[in-house]
Amino acid sequence: RKEVEQDPGPFNVPEGATVAFNCTYSNSASQSFFWYRQDCRKEPKLLMSVYSSGNEDGRFTAQLNRASQYISLLIRDSKLSDSATYLCVVNEGYSTLTFGKGTMLLVSP
Amino acid sequence: GAVVSQHPSRVICKSGTSVKIECRSLDFQATTMFWYRQFPKQSLMLMATSNEGSKATYEQGVEKDKFLINHASLTLSTLTVTSAHPEDSSFYICSAQRARSNEKLFFGSGTQLSVL
C-alpha cells in the first residue's frame, strides 16, 4: 500500500519562530510533490511545488530527499496567519495522487 | 490560472433526500477528477476517482451506490449523495488535474453538506 505519512501535530509555536515539517512517502517511483495549505472548512490551496534541487518562496523552503523518500517544509519567522493544516501531496504518476493526513500548525502571539 | 468551480457551496437537506454536487473545470480539460470528503478536524479522505467516459473508481469503504459519480464530459463531474443521512454531513471537495499532466491539483471551493 502506497502511503504518505505526516506528523499530525499540532505544532504550537510562537510568532517569529522557525518550524519544519517532514513528510515521508513509500513509493520510490513517485514523480512530483507538493505542499498544500488548508484552512478550516476551506479547500486546500497550493503552497508550493517541491523540486529536486529544493526551492524557496519567501519565508517558505521546500526540500526533497529522494534517497530517504521524504519532503520537508520549513517556515521561517512564523506569522499568526500561518496557522493552518499543511498537506503533503505525492503524485505517483498520471492521476495517482496520495495525500498525507496533514500537519496542524498553531502560531501564537 | 486554471479554475475549478464547485456548486453548491452549502446544502442543508432533510434525511432521505438526494443531493447533487457539481464540479467544473472552467478553462482546461480534466480527464480525471477526484472527490474527497472531510469530517471536522480530520484530513481529506479520497472517496473516488472520476474518469471521463468510464466508471469511477471508489476507495475502499465508499459505497458506490450511495455516492453516484458521473463524469460525462471533460469539464464536468457530478457527485450525487443518494438518500442522505445525518452521518453523510461533511465537507465535500472536488479537484481536477489537467489531462496527461503531473502538475498540481486544482481544487473546487468545497460543499458543506448538512443533513438534518
Image (cartoon, coloured by chain):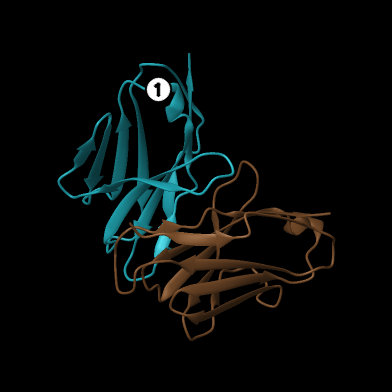
Chain colours: A cyan, B brown
Rendered residue at 35%/39% (across/down):
A22
The x and y percentages for residue B23 are: 53, 66
Q: Quadrant of the image for the N terminus of chain B?
A: bottom left
Task: Please tell me in which quadrant of the rendered image residue A15 appears.
Answer: top left
The x and y percentages for residue B106 are: 41, 58
A11 to the left or right of A68: right
Rendered residue at 30%/24% (across/down):
A76
B78 to the left or right of B74: right
Q: Report the amino acid beneath label 1.
A: Lys
- Report the front residue among A57 and A90: A57
Does A85 sit above or below residue A59?
Answer: below
Residue A65 visible in the current orientation: yes
- For label 1, the SS is loop
Rendered residue at 43%/78% (across/down):
B74
Furthest residue in direction top, as rendered: A109
Residue where numbered disc 1 is placed: A79
Q: Quadrant of the image for the C terminus of chain B?
A: bottom right
The x and y percentages for residue B42 are: 60, 45
- Report the front residue among B56 and B115: B115
Furthest residue in direction front, as rendered: B27
Does A24 sit above or below residue A31?
Answer: above
The x and y percentages for residue B43 are: 55, 48
Residue A26 visible in the current orientation: no
A60 to the left or right of B7: left
Crowding at mark 1 (Cα within 10 Å: few <14, some 14-19, many 20+)? some
Rendered residue at 36%/53% (across/down):
A25
- Report the front residue among A2 and A104: A104
